[in-house]
Image (cartoon, rainbow, N blue to C red):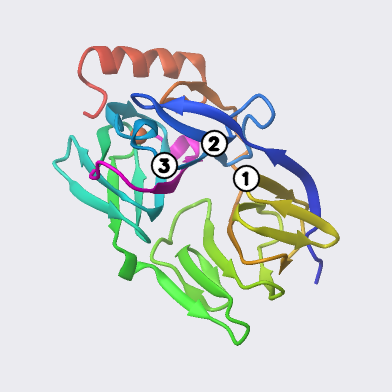
Amino acid sequence: MTERTLERRVQGMPASDGAGVRLNRVIGTPALKHLDPFLMLDEFKSDSADDYIAGFPSHPHRGFETVTYMLAGRMEHRDHLDNVGLLEAGGAQWMTAGRGIIHSEMPQQQEGLMWGFQLWINLPAAEKMQRARYRDLAPDDIAEARDEQGVERRVIAGDSLGVVGPVGGLSVDPLMVDIRMPSGSDIAHPVKSGHRAFVYAYRGAVKIADETLTAGQLGILRDGDRVRLTADGDSGVLLLAARPIGEPIVQYGPFVMNSSEEIEQALRDYRDDRLTE
Ligand code: FE
């Protein structure tokens, strides 16, 4: 057994996306461009409607998967396949853009806290042009467990100490767990060797070996087969891991492919209204 230690701590940076939603971008910045296969991680958290009310009107994606996970607030998803889903506190949405999806995510509230995450996970070349797929995960669909220390796990993808999340069967074999820890509690969580893994603290602070990660920071983990987290105050973290793809990444806004020719094709397809065909 090898414990994963902290390789690098990364601070998010303020950014704006969609029609002007203010957020903390943690992956997809000059400091951390990608963390193969993770392409982007945003945290949006505000109780000021001006920061989120404009939402994410209709926009395209090609070549990867987008995951939205909500801690507070309500958003409505709509896409070109006529899927409509309400994203609410504790729920998630796992969308495989594949060859193309055109969707919107718009707030369903005029005031109050909106808090959540958007994560982009890359697809290998052989899977980039698959048909788009959308999975709406209601709060009840997410697997939950609580240990004797009061540590709560909400498992969205993969296997968390025998608790299996609703999302599985993907080639990058993702693990995505929201871990909520009372002050002083600790947990040793398995993470597959060779998988790229990180912890993002969204509340409080956690210790990884002797180093502390505070809210708003992402910690990239060295290789190993488990990570030990100790809560320094009441804390909440996301634990993410997945198999790296190891292919070239060429990104242009919402399109992520392997070459600039494929990006040009995506732009042509979008212009010609053929992105999703
Ligand atoms: Fe989107």
Looking at the rendered image, the disc whose residue lies closer to the viewer, 3 or 1, is 1
Q: Residue 18, relative to residue 186: is it above or below?
A: above
Q: Secondary structure at mark 2?
A: strand
Residue drawn at x 66%, y 62% is: 192
Q: Residue 108, relative to residue 52: is it above or below?
A: below
Label 2–label 1 contact, CB within 8 A? yes
Disc 2 CB within 8 Å of nearest ligand 1 atom? no
Along the horizontal axis of the image, is 44 left or right of 277? right
Q: Nearer the viewer, residue 77 or 175?
A: 77
Could you tell me how far apart the alpha carbons at marks 3 and 1 are, in whole angstroms? 23 Å
Residue drawn at x 33%, y 65% is: 139
Q: Report the span colored magenta.
A: 108-128
Q: Earlier in the sequence, mark 2 or mark 3?
A: 2
- Could you tell me residue 228's position as x and y percent? 74, 68
Residue drawn at x 42%, y 25% is: 255
Q: Earlier in the sequence, mark 2 or mark 1?
A: 2
- Could you tell me residue 266's position as x and y percent? 35, 19
- Could you tell me residue 275's position as x and y percent? 26, 24
Q: Amino acid at mark 2?
A: Asn
| Residue that mark 1 sits on | 216
| Residue that mark 2 sits on | 24
Q: Secondary structure at mark 1?
A: loop
| Residue that mark 3 sits on | 65
Q: Earlier in the sequence, mark 3 or mark 1?
A: 3
Along the horizontal axis of the image, is 143 left or right of 233? left
Disc 1 crowd rating (10 Å Cα; few below 14, some 14-19, many 20+) is many
Q: Which mark identifies residue 261?
A: none
